Image (spheres, helix red, strand yellow):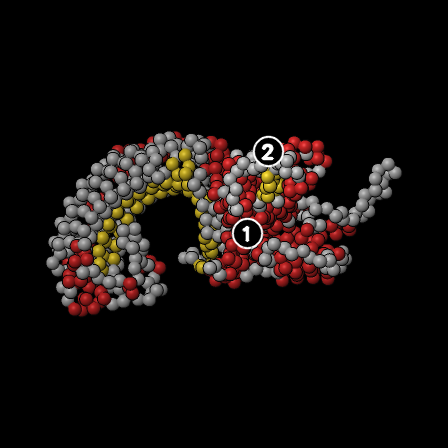
């Protein structure tokens, strides 16, 4: 047994399908039910009452009664009753064996004559009609249950039900109708036009009742007709939808003649708001509709199955009618039977009557009538399919509404389903269109952003960086929250993975905005906002995946000072092309240009683009930079960075950069530095970074760089240092980490201004004592990961030393003179814990003492920053054990 709760889902499932059945499908369903009832009635009667009644027919009487049959069949039936009154001389004597089983003989003859005398249509047509009716029942809804179409149809109906239930549907349609009312009132307020000429027809300003107009849609008709009966809606939220629309419809009857009425309308709009769960469900529904549309519009299986089903039903009806009409004449009341059983009953001919012949004939006529109506409806269906463009659907009436004009046209199976849905109720397609409109989705996202990302939350997320600038970072939002444009004190804005970032005219409220970061976020700028960005924006960081994603408005920011471009750039199709760099010519005030890509050459137009460029940075991600001749024309360049460019020699174009101060060629394939002599005329070059290359030796020509203050040769393969290196009297930072040095020349004592020396990761066994007696300005000394066996006691003369790294050496003890390094306390000494314990207790206590509070040091004694020795506050400093040091 099945419970009602188990049968309820089946009933709901069937009720859903009725939304896709037009009126002719419903009519055909009723006709099939009537045909099924007629066939079942005929089968029931035939099973319970169908029989024939036969009596023997005398040969003489039958010969003389031919003319009587033509007048009336009843006379033939009464002939056997007159047999006893005929003279015995005229009636032949029966030749059969006499028996008293007269009733059994008649039963036998009736059964034999039922199968021999009756035509097959009288015996089997009710069963055939029942089978035909069942086939029509199955074929009537075959397209709804076909395996390749049922899943898509059920998904469509489920989405449609959610669209009808969503509160956003009522709010969007209300907003659309309200905007239409406002536009109509604005048209009514316009000055009257001059009277038309007599030949021209009068122009009416009244609303026309049309289903194509957005405001006179079935939804508004239901809400306007307060006194009329509202038909039941198939969606569960019809009552809520109508109740929501009623204030709008009442407002549409009264023109907006005062400001008070407009305020009332605005308040009604604000009153209908979605909570968080409804907003999330609506956004998920937009995504479902988008995915279903992309899937359904690529298929025509539903349309083809429905067309094939209709053609099959029409052909079946024609076949049934063709072979049934001739059979109708064979259904008669009387039949002559020759059973060939004369030896048993004594008679060879019997006259039989069919009891249900009259009823069967009437049922056949009724069945054929219903079948004819069924066939006519199928003809109408085929004509509707052929004369209608069912594979294309356009929301004509919705495009009249000002806020739903962007509803796209649909095609293929989705268009066909909406055409079928319109035959049931056009209002359902309108509710679905809310989730097909990009404008509707944009309004939903705006409301969600306003609710979740208010001004208070954005203020709480704003932080202050090390430079004292207020900074805000937004990641993975669908669009910019409206409250963002109210942050007047924001200076740095970082946007990452924003789907649709658009700067509107409200950006003018951000008075302090100077720096903008766009990471994988293609931002659009309105013309009114572009002027504001052109005047205020100074720094722009833009990260992308393809060069085609670079928006054109970037190249019109005339006040821009720094531009950072990071993405897949190449000389074949990107910023490396002249047309792309030529578009930068409007950036008259550009000072810094940073490019991260895969360039093969530096375009010659770059110098024309940024004639005042002072810093150029190219990070080439391992792609070889072949052409650098354009650098010769950048005479004002003061800082040049060429990293990961696979350079094997120093570019010759560097000779023309007479104002160059910083040269960074790290992470390349430099093997020799013989070209350093060509840099002799670069008298302002103070920083040279050549780390992470393959340099084998430093030539003596390095001595020509007299103004050099920073020299970074870390992570190379240098074994010895030339004496000319120590003639650079202005050198302050010498970084030689991770090389193959076995000794440090004594000439290092000539570098009296040296403040940082990094010798970590080499093979040094000792340090020259003159290093500690002459280089008295040394503040940072890193000799970790060497083979030092002793640390000279002269280290105590370094009164400015504040950082000393001695880890991973072969030291057995530390000199007590470390206590004379007055600035080494507070975590400035990095050494194994067991080695630190070898110091005398007073020295340990002195070195373990925390550093003085900030501001104690004078301006000349501030701890310098170092690339090889990062500074940690004393509270975060801890000594490593010997085991940790070995690891």
Taking 349 as reference, is 546 left or right?
Answer: left
Residue at the image point whose x is 16% and y is 50% from the top: 786
Residue at the image point whose x is 12% and y is 60% from the top: 813
Q: Is residue 864 above or below residue 342?
A: below
Q: Position of residue 458 (x, y in %)?
A: 50, 59
Cα separation between marks 2 and 1: 34 Å
Please identify the residue farthest to the right as the structure is shown: 198
- The residue carrying mark 2 is 323
Tell which tag, 2 or 1, sits nearer the viewer.
Answer: 2
- The residue carrying mark 1 is 14
Q: Which mark is residue 286?
A: none
Taking 138 as reference, is 272 left or right?
Answer: right
Residue at the image point whose x is 31% and y is 35% from the top: 646
Q: Position of residue 260 (x, y in %)?
A: 73, 62
**Nearest the camera: 189 or 649?**
189
Q: Is residue 439 above or below residue 856?
A: above
Q: Quadrant of the C terminus?
A: bottom left
**Nearest the camera: 41 or 819?**
41
Q: Earlier in the sequence, mark 2 or mark 1?
A: 1
- Quadrant in the rendering for residue 885: bottom left
Residue 659 in view of the camera: no
**Nearest the camera: 751 or 755?**
755
Asked whether the beta carbons under mark 2 and mark 1 sit within 8 Å of each other, the answer is: no
Q: Position of residue 459 (x, y in %)?
A: 50, 61
């Amino acid at each position: 047994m099945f419970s009602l709760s188990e049968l309820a889902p089946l009933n709901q499932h069937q009720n859903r399908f009725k939304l896709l059945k037009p009126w002719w499908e419903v009519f055909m369903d009723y006709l099939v039910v009537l045909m099924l009832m007629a066939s079942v009635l005929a089968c029931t009667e035939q099973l319970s009452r169908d029989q024939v009644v036969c009596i023997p027919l005398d040969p003489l009487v039958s010969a003389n009664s031919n003319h009587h049959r033509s007048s009336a069949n009843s006379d033939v039936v009464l002939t056997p009753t007159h047999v006893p009154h005929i003279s015995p001389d005229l009636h032949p004597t029966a030749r059969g064996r006499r028996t008293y089983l007269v009733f059994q003989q008649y039963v036998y003859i009736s059964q034999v004559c039922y199968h021999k005398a009756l035509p097959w249509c009288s015996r089997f047509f009710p069963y055939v009609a029942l089978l035909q009716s069942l086939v029509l029942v199955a074929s009537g809804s075959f397209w709804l249950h076909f395996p390749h179409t049922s899943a898509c149809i059920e998904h469509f109906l489920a989405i449609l039900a959610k669209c009808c239930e969503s509160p956003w549907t009522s709010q969007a349609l209300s907003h659309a109708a309200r905007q239409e009312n406002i536009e109509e009132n604005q048209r009514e307020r316009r000055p009257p036009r001059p009277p038309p000429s007599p030949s021209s027809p009068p122009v009416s300003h009244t609303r026309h009742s049309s289903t194509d107009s957005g405001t006179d849609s079935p939804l508004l008709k239901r809400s306007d007709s307060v006194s009329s009966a509202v038909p039941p809606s198939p969606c569960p939220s019809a009552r809520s939808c109508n109740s929501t629309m009623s204030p709008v419809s009442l407002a549409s009857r009264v023109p907006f003649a005062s400001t008070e009425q407009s305020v009332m309308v605005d308040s009604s709009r604000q009153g209908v708001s979605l909570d968080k769960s409804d907003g999330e469900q609506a956004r998920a529904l937009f995504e479902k509709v988008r995915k279903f549309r992309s899937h359904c519009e690529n298929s025509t299986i539903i349309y083809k199955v429905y067309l094939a089903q209709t053609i099959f039903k029409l052909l079946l009806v024609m076949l049934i009618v063709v072979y049934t009409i001739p059979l109708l004449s064979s259904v008669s009341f009387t039949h002559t039977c020759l059973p060939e059983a004369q030896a048993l009953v004594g008679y060879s001919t019997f006259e039989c009557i069919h009891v249900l012949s009259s009823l069967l004939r009437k049922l056949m006529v009724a069945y054929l009538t219903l079948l004819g109506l069924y066939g006519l409806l199928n003809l109408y269906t085929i004509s509707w399919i052929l004369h209608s463009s069912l594979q294309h659907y356009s929301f004509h009436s919705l495009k009249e509404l000002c806020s739903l004009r962007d509803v796209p046209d649909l095609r293929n199976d989705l268009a066909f389903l909406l055409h079928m849905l319109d035959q049931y109720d056009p209002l359902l397609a309108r509710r679905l269109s809310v989730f097909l409109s990009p404008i509707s989705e944009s309004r939903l996202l705006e409301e969600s952003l306003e609710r979740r990302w208010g001004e208070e939350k954005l203020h709480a997320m704003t932080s202050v960086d090390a430079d004292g600038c207020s900074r805000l970072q937004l990641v993975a939002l669908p669009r910019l929250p409206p409250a963002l444009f109210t942050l007047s004190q924001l200076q740095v804005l970082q946007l990452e993975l924003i789907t649709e970032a658009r700067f509107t005219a409200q950006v003018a409220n951000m008075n302090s905005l100077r720096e903008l970061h766009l990471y994988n976020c293609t931002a659009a700028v309105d013309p009114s906002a572009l002027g504001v960005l052109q005047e205020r924006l100074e720094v722009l960081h833009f990260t992308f995946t393809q060069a085609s994603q670079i928006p054109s408005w970037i190249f019109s920011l005339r006040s821009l000072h720094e531009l950072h471009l990071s993405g897949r750039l190449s000389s074949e199709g990107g910023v490396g092309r002249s047309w792309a760099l030529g578009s930068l010519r409007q950036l008259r005030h550009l000072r810094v240009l940073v490019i991260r890509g895969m360039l093969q050459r530096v375009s010659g137009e770059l110098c024309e683009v940024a004639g005042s460029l002072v810093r150029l940075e190219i990070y080439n991600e391992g792609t070889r930079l072949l052409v650098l001749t354009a650098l010769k024309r950048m005479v004002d360049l003061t800082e040049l960075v060429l990293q990961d460019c696979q350079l094997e020699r120093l570019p010759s174009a560097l000779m023309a950069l007479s104002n160059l101060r910083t040269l960074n060629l790290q992470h390349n394939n430099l093997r020799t530095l013989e070209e350093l002599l060509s840099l002799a005329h670069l008298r302002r070059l103070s920083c040279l970074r050549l780390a992470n290359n393959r340099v084998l030796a430093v030539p003596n020509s390095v001595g020509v760089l007299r103004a050099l203050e920073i020299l970074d040769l870390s992570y190379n393969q240098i074994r010895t240092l030339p004496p000319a290196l120590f003639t650079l009297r202005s050198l302050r930072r010498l970084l030689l980490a991770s090389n193959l040095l076995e000794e440090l020349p004594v000439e290092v004592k000539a570098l009296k201004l040296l403040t940082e020396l990094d010798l970590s990761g080499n093979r040094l066994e000792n340090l020259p004592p003159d290093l500690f007696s002459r280089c008295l300005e040394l503040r940072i000394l890193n000799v970790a990961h060497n083979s030092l066996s002793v640390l000279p006691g002269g280290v105590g003369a370094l009164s400015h030393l504040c950082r000393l790294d001695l880890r991973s050496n072969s030291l057995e003890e530390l000199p007590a003179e470390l206590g004379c390094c007055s600035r080494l306390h507070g975590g400035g000494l990095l050494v194994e814990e067991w080695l630190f314990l070898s110091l005398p207790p007073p020295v340990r206590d002195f070195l373990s003492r925390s550093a003085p509070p900030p501001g104690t040091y004078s301006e000349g004694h501030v701890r310098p920053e170092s690339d090889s020795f990062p500074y940690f506050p004393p509270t975060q400093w801890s000594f490593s054990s010997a085991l940790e040091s070995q690891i």
